[in-house]
Image (cartoon, helix red, strand yellow):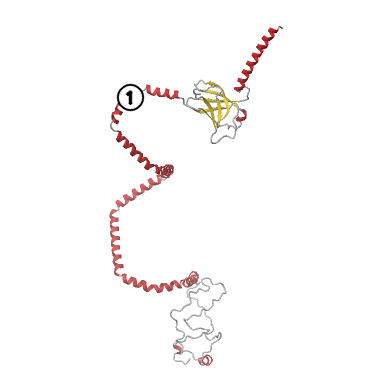
Amino acid sequence: MTASTLRTVTGVATVALLMGIVVLAVEMFHGVFVPSAPVTLVSARAGLVMNPDAKVKLHGVEVGRVATIGSRPDGGAVLHLALSPKWISQIPANVDARIVSSTVFGAKFVELVVPQSPSHEALRAGQVLDADHVTVENNTVFQQLSDVLAQVDPGKLNATLTAVASGLSGRGDAMAKAVSDFDAVLTTVEPSLPTLDHELDVAPIAAGAYADSAEDTVTTMRNVADVSKTIVDTEHQLDEFLISTIGLSDLGVDVLGSNRERLSSVVHLLAPTTDLTNKYGPALTCGLAGVLPLAKSPPPPLPGSITMIGFILGTERYRYPANLPKVAATGGSQCTDLPHVPPGKRTPYVVADVNANPWQYGNQGILLNSDGLKQLLFGPIDGPPRNTAQVGQPG
């Protein structure tokens, strides 16, 4: 090989090597040699300025790119995404996908949005996603506006605008005042908006309560109608009842008015008796309760009465005036064991200022009917006993 041929081969190899390095750098820049996980995104349309190698972002971080863009028979678009394997395991399987753009005329990219309730499973290779939003381009807005304007007759539009201009001509001040008044109304209503929001929130609950009670309400109204009809049918009897009630009221007013002082006197006279009865109410209650078993006891087996006779030691005789009952005697209400006296229980004797005191002289045995002996032992005693058998006797 000559030197000239060697230089030619070396130059061609050098150029080929440089071109290979450039191609390799470009492919590396496009991520051809970077491992990726394929995911398919199906959308109603891809929108303008959506090109291959567009970015795929999650929370603003690039997690992949758009490998290719295809179309479907129904006019939709299919985007083949190449996601980074280190990110795909951190993306939930139910992630939402949107085709958006950073500016109005900027290039679009795919944005992945994590839902409020993310799935516990991660996104897997080969999964198909649906794009729920595609940014609307200006040309789409202009196309829709052109379609609307194409349906408008210019002559009718001119006539409508002329009528509107004629109607508004010279009414600027009135319109300004109306706008100002409306602003004042809104300013007044604005503080009540939270209350209105609360009322709107609780309105369904109240409406539900009314709906639940609708049947009972209708039944009540029907019953009210029946009652009203009954009142109409018996109006004569009702008139007589009202007249009789008025007459009874007049009679009652007459009776109470004419006997007002007497009734007041009776009430005042009964006050001490009722006070004393109230004071000794417990004793009266236990006494009546003690008699109650006698009322409930079975009748005797034979007609007649049963009498129990026994002999007890004599007690001190009643003497005048020492044994006279005392007025306003104290001692209070005493029930002892009544109304439930235990078996074998002997109720103690209550010494009161109402009779002779059997323990006045301290003797508990048989008494000798001799006042002389008593006078000898205890000194002078009160007058003769208060019984007809011994009236005038010395003792």
User: Left of 342 or right of it: where is 186?
Assistant: left
Residue at label 1?
157
- Which residue occupies the foreground of this view, 355 or 116? 116
Does residue 192 sit above or below 35 in this rendering?
A: below
* Residue visible at 68% across and 7% down in the picture: 5
Does residue 362 sit above or below 84 in this rendering?
A: below
* Residue visible at 39% across and 24% down in the picture: 148
* Residue visible at 64% across and 16% down in the picture: 18
**Quarter of the rendering containing residue 341:** bottom right
* Residue visible at 49% across and 69% down in the picture: 296
Q: Count how many numbered circles sit on residues in the image.
A: 1
User: Left of 305 or right of it: where is 12?
Assistant: right
**Quarter of the rendering containing residue 24:** top right
| Residue situated furthest front in the rendering | 3
User: Left of 392 or right of it: where is 254?
Assistant: left
Quadrant of the snapshot with the N terminus: top right
Question: Residue 139 appears at what percent x and percent y?
Answer: 44, 23
Does residue 100 sit above or below 338 in this rendering?
A: above
Question: Residue 222 appears at what percent x and percent y?
Answer: 36, 47
User: Left of 113 or right of it: where is 258?
Assistant: left
Callout 1 secondary element: helix
Mark 1 crowd level (few <14, some 14–19, many ≥20, 10 Å Cα): few
Question: Residue 283 appears at what percent x and percent y?
Answer: 48, 73
Does residue 56 sit above or below 380 in this rendering?
A: above
Question: Residue 187 appears at what percent x and percent y?
Answer: 37, 41
Amino acid on which disc 1 is placed: Leu
- Which residue occupies the foreground of this view, 300 or 68? 68
- Which residue occupies the foreground of this view, 157 or 179? 179
- Which residue occupies the foreground of this view, 160 or 237? 160
